[in-house]
Image (cartoon, helix red, strand yellow):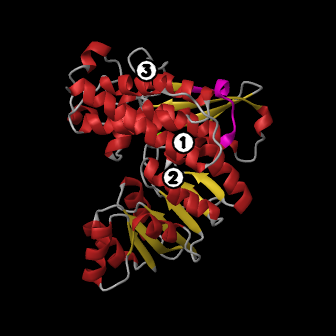
Amino acid sequence: MKHVTILGSTGSIGRSALEVISRCRDRFKVVGLTAKNNIELLEEQIKAFNPEIVAVADETGALQLGKKLGIRVLSGDSGVAEVASYNKADFVLSAIIGFAGLFPTLSAVRAGKTIGLANKESLVVAGEIVMKDAGKAGAKIIPVDSEHSAIFQCMEGRSKEFVKRIVITASGGPFLGKRSSELNKVTIEDALKHPNWDMGKKITIDSATLMNKGLEVIEAHRLFGFSPDMIDVLIHPQSIVHSMVEFKDRSCIAQLSVPDMKGPIAYALTYPERLDDPMPFLDLTAVGKLTFQKPDTGCFPCLLYAYEAMKEGGTMPAVLNAANEVAVNGFMQNEIGFNDIPVVINNTMRLHERKPVVDIDTIVEADRWAREKAEDYINKVRS
Ligand code: MG
């Protein structure tokens, strides 16, 4: 019986994970759950899975839920950290979105857990620290991001020294093929209509700008240690090939499945074993054809900014990420247009003097600085 904790259980990945687990109650026992502020859903999850330890990041929400259920609900950052490092968990699914997932992920890493990592931002902003601490504590990181799960699966039993390059695929999002001028007036609703994947809002907007792919490029660089020039991106609108590894002999190994996050979640949960039918069967005759094209970085420059931040290293990826979080939030609040998102990021990066990452405080400071600059810029645009 594997004892599982889910950080961010009310989000899209958290819900999918509980769906997988609910079908294999003989293999998994949920011991810990955390949520940001969706206490209604968390309450349902507590009743269905009976965890031993629960935390709500929002203090008021934690109090409300504790009173209602008559149980102890931990709260705030320290409460979430306590759940992340809970000693009875064998496996921690890190599924909190954005920079907020960094410290909970680090708590699980430092407690030496096996971690299913869906929070890509923790590797983007603090990859050096996360990977070093994982090595020290003996924590194992299994990627849950579908592209990284694909690369992880393609690399299984194979040596990195024979890899020529990796190719990360991208659906292209809802605005694939549009011209930049056509993107000036797109709405939040347009941006949230992802053609293939059913995901949370922030990541869906990131997919529309191609920043999601940019963050994933940095994530792959940190997770697998491939140099920036070994990482390529291809647009693949059908989202069937989730990524591929090209070896030195020019042989390519790819991983294919229907686009369903339950696949990579189940793989991380059961690795190195494989679960029976966590997602629908891939009917290639129904898909018909698989197509690939180069990304249009003129229209979607966020991908270029991510490559730049990856090559610069130090605090630059943290600045890229923070500016993006602020810009996406500004777009969702209707404060800026879709095409302003890359402008906010680019502007913030130009103002930043890159520093080497000494410790986690360097990252926190760079994140804070970038948020302030990005917000200043948005306020200027609006006034
Ligand atoms: Mg992905």
- Tag 3: amino acid: Pro
- The image shows residue 362 at horizontal and vertical percentages of 57, 44
- Rendered view: 288 above or below 295: below
Report the span colored magenta. 224-232
Residue denoted by label 3: 301
Residue 226 got which mark?
none
Q: Disc 2 versus disc 1: distance between alpha carbons?
A: 8 Å
Asked whether the viewer can see residue 61, the reply is yes
Residue appearing at x 41%, y 66% in the figure: 34
Residue 231 lies in magenta, yes or no? Answer: yes
**Disc 2 to disc 3: CB gap under 8 Å:** no
Residue denoted by label 1: 125
Query: Where, quadrant-wise, is the C terminus in this rendering?
Result: top left
Residue denoted by label 2: 102
SS state under label 1 = helix
**Disc 2 to disc 1: CB gap under 8 Å:** yes
